[in-house]
Amino acid sequence: MSDKKKFYMTTAIAYTSGKPHIGNTYEIVLADAIARYKRLEGYDVYFQTGTDEHGQKIELKAAEKGITPKEFVDGVAGEVRRIWDLMNTSYDGFVRTTDKDHETQVQKIFKKLYDKGDIYKSSYEGLYCTPCESFWTESQLVDGKCPDCGREVSPAKEEAYFFKMSKYADRLIEHINAHPEFIQPVSRKNEMMNNFLLPGLQDLCVSRTSFSWGIPVDFDPKHVVYVWLDALTNYITKIGYDVDSNSTDLFRKNWPAELHLIGKDIIRFHTIYWPIFLMALDLPLPKQVFGHPWLLQGGEKMSKSKGNVIYADDMVELFGVDATRYFVLHEMPFENDGIITWELVVERFNSDLANILGNLVSRTVSMSNKYFGGVVTRTGVTEAVDEDLKSVVTEARDKISAKMQELRVADAITEVFNVFRRCNKYIDETAPWVLAKDEAQKDRLSEVLYNLVEAITIGASLLKSFLPETADKIAGQLNTGLRGFDELNQFELYESGNKVTDAPEILFARLDVKEVMPRVEEIRAAQKAEYEAEQRALGKEPAEAAGDGAADENAAVIDIEPKEEITFDDFMKMQFQVGEIIECKAVEKSKKLLCSQVRIGSQVKQIVSGIRKEYSPEEMVGKKVMVLVNLKPAKLAGVLSEGMLLCAEDENGVLSLMVPEKEMPAGAEIC
């Protein structure tokens, strides 16, 4: 057995209802970056992912296509794995919940918990959401719909087995309070404690009889195991957990997991249900559950029905694997949702990958060839500016490690690019093309180019966890290997007299958005045609099936009472600008109000808004919003408000913030 410190991490397993979009794919890329960096640090990593393949939704989708559920999930699971592999992710284990060994252990787990008295048979009557596979009470609904996905629910009553959640609730609360790192970010922990645990847990339905696509309860086969008990246990079954104490060495070595990396929408299942199941099995709890935010298309959640889905393979076709990896890793904040648009990807590709990184490597290799025939030599002719470069480069490793320890991956990759930015600045400071004109400065020029090659080598080694193919290409052009962790805070390890490649490869050629967007339109048209064909094959009209996503001339509209006409001069008195919310908290004396600090250009305004029902303070931070800036200040619930956030309101009083369609700087005028 390795004497390295172990690190077992998992993603959520992808639900096999359809092809994963870039928002789903983000999670596996994020996990891969963490796993690769842990390996660089010297950890013995076991990185697991997979697919969740049971449930009523799968059964219905298979029936629509006229195939068996197993045939349906085989196809989707294959597609999931293809995309995970396309994105160059280094997972060690891929679990499918239709794997025989998993199904066997789930049956044994269910029986053990039943024999222990934690599971009992009763009947359930409630409101059921098929897409989420969840029962709800009337009080838990939001505007009469599922609180998780916002879809319609329907009454359901059936015999079921239930798990006694309340039996373990106090123990779980105690654990969370004693281990503040268990649920991250902190906002997710507060949500779980305040909204679910502290008000009291209801017993959980853990079997169903209204459909058959699931793992049968072996002692009562008309029941199938509820999807969450089935799915969550994959984290132990795949690595060899056995109820009968015959667990494998892999399980004994790796459990408990150091990290469950999941989407914020399933945090409740992983921080309440899963820990309680583990307590009932007398198993230790995972060290940490991190609920990452969503990657949203133009500010809204991606869905096929909205026609706004971006897929990883389409992005790879246009930008390449590493550029796609860079975007999703760099653009996703630690706690708030990230935004993706095709135009923004092109912008980041050009500004960061082509300009900062690609141009740096190309210039350095080209100058080495032009001035010294590609031979890189130390001469010892140094100047003060060299020390600052070396300091930035050799301190980067520890800064990145600190960010990665907190799972602030976007910040970590920014630190990597700070190395490359410093190299570009060093070129400007030393002006090699000027040194080359003076024969007396030849040794100084050689030292400058040596420093650049050495700094880029360290930068590429740090980049490997995030953009693995690019890091290898850079090392190839510099004719060197990538460094190990212990060498990344040392300078001058590049072999003096080594020769770089004769012809530098362009790592990232600049893109013209005007050339990219026609191809994007082709992709969208193909997706639309495929979606419409699927719906018609099911006997549905596409607009009806797409619901809120498709254009429909008969769609619901709202007429409001018209106000008195105003003149253009009246309108010009109002100043509208884009603002960025940098801080937000609930107003203590109100159930409706949020108080936001909004950056508008170089100033920050405090604005109070009655949107607490629709938005939590945590999800407000980072949003770009439309602001009426010159509204006369007023106090709401005793708190000063210096402007107004613009919202749309439907007939039920539901509010939606107005956000810019494209990325705009804080302070941009709305006219």
Image (spheres, rainbow, N blue to C red):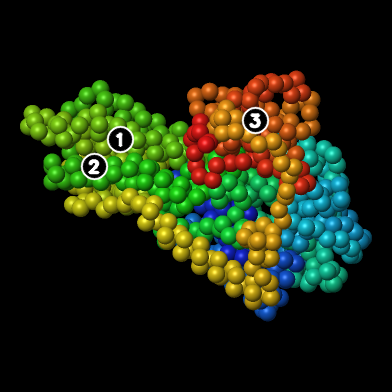
What residue did someone put label 3 on? Answer: 644
Depicted 125 relative to depicted 39: above or below? below
Tell me which label, 3 or 1, sits earlier in the chain: 1
Q: Position of residue 607 (x, y in %)?
A: 65, 27
Tell me the residue at 39%/48% (across/down).
349
Among numbered discs 1 and 2, the one appearing first in the sequence: 2
The answer to which image quadrant residue 79 occupies is bottom right
Q: Position of residue 315 (x, y in %)?
A: 46, 57
Examine the image and state in which quarter residue 487 appears: top left
* Residue drawn 60% across the image and 70% down it: 532
Left or right side of 631 for 298:
left
Q: Nearer the viewer, mark 3 or mark 1?
A: 3
456 in relation to 215, above or below: above
Q: Quadrant of residue 356?
A: top left
Percent position (x, y) of residue 526?
51, 67
CA gap, disc 3 to disc 1? 44 Å
Residue most extreme to the right: 122
Q: Amino acid at mark 3?
A: Met
| Residue lying at 69% horizontally and 75% vertically, measured from the top left | 539
The residue pinned by badge 1 equals 423
Q: Are marks 1 and 2 in contact (CB under 8 Å)?
A: yes
* Residue type, mark 2 in image: Thr
For residue 364, the mark is 2
Task: From the viewer's side, name the closer residue of 579 and 67.
Answer: 579
Q: Amino acid at mark 1?
A: Cys
Tag 1, which secondary structure?
helix
